[in-house]
Amino acid sequence: MANGSRQAAWEFFGAELKRRREDAGITQVELGSRVFVSGGYIGQFEQAIRKPQLDVAQRIDEALQTDGIFERLWRKLIKEQPYTEYFAHVAELERLATEICEYAPAVVPGLLQTREYAQAMFLANKPLAATEYIEELIKGRMDRTRILKDVTRPVYWAVLHETALCIPVGSPAVMASQLDHIATLMRERKVLVQVLPFAAGAHPEMGRQMKLMDFEDAPPTVYTEGVLSGSLLDEPAVVKGARASYDLIRAAALSPEASLALIESAAEDFRRCASTT
């Protein structure tokens, strides 16, 4: 489904939600209290600005007694987008965020990836997948990276463990290009990137990926990912704890200037390796 068609489908979801809510004679605030979100969230769902998570769609069905229509719509719309079910809502929120902070312990985060790096990652995970399917996955990832090129792009701050600079994803040439890409974004002041060096030793959230997102008119969230699963949370205490961990990771990392030098040095090492193969 094309982006325009998908957005139109979510607009239908929102219009149907508004119609069913008004038919039931309840306000956005009242519905929000029944499904444990704010009335403002309900308004954003109805305008297709934000997309509800599955559990919210299920609670809306219960509150409006709609016999599962919103759960069925949600599952159909999520199925037709190029992201796994557990990540689809995160991809939507990235577009709305005013600030995104990531910690990547082993690989370059998706928003910073080049096409070739992403392709190598997908092929490693699905070596027998059809070319068309891999291309769809790559397109979805590249579509996400566009937010860093927008005039209204969010503040983006990533901490990469030095491991991510050393693991040869794809060929040495692919790695050189990937690291050059990060360095270019840094030099163009589109992103802030720090490297957590091996010498830093033990650190908070060791080995665990983390993405923090802030919004203009919604609570901040934290996203963590596991094996074929992900957790997107906006509980204030949880987000506060994740932010504290991220601040400690950032404090232990190299400065942006030293990080840029290390990234460029790693790129040159891969480039020399590529030239000898």
Image (cartoon, rainbow, N blue to C red):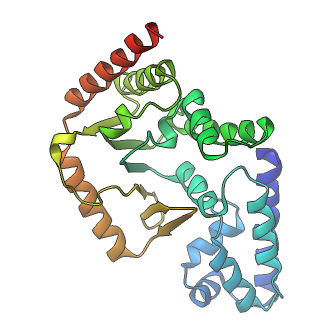
Query: Would residue 10 be seen by someone viewing this image from the given angle?
Result: no
Task: Tell me the residue at 59%/53% (across/down).
Answer: 91
Q: Percent from the top left, x then y, of residue 48?
A: 70, 61
Q: Is residue 27 above or below residue 261?
A: below
Query: Would residue 247 be seen by someone viewing this image from the given angle?
Result: yes
Residue toward you, 232 or 24: 232
Task: Tell me the residue at 60%/29% (across/down).
Answer: 115
Count the marks: how many?
Answer: 0
Task: Tell me the residue at 61%/55% (across/down).
Answer: 92
In terms of image quadrants, where is residue 131? top right
Residue toward you, 274 or 203: 274
Q: Is residue 203 left or right of residue 48?
A: left
Task: Tell me the residue at 72%/91% (across/down).
Answer: 62
Q: Is residue 36 above or below residue 273?
A: below
Q: Percent from the top left, x then y, of residue 36?
A: 55, 85
Residue lying farthest to the top in this orientation: 275
Q: Percent from the top left, x then y, of residue 57?
A: 69, 77
Residue toward you, 60 or 106: 106
Q: Is residue 26 above or below residue 192?
A: below
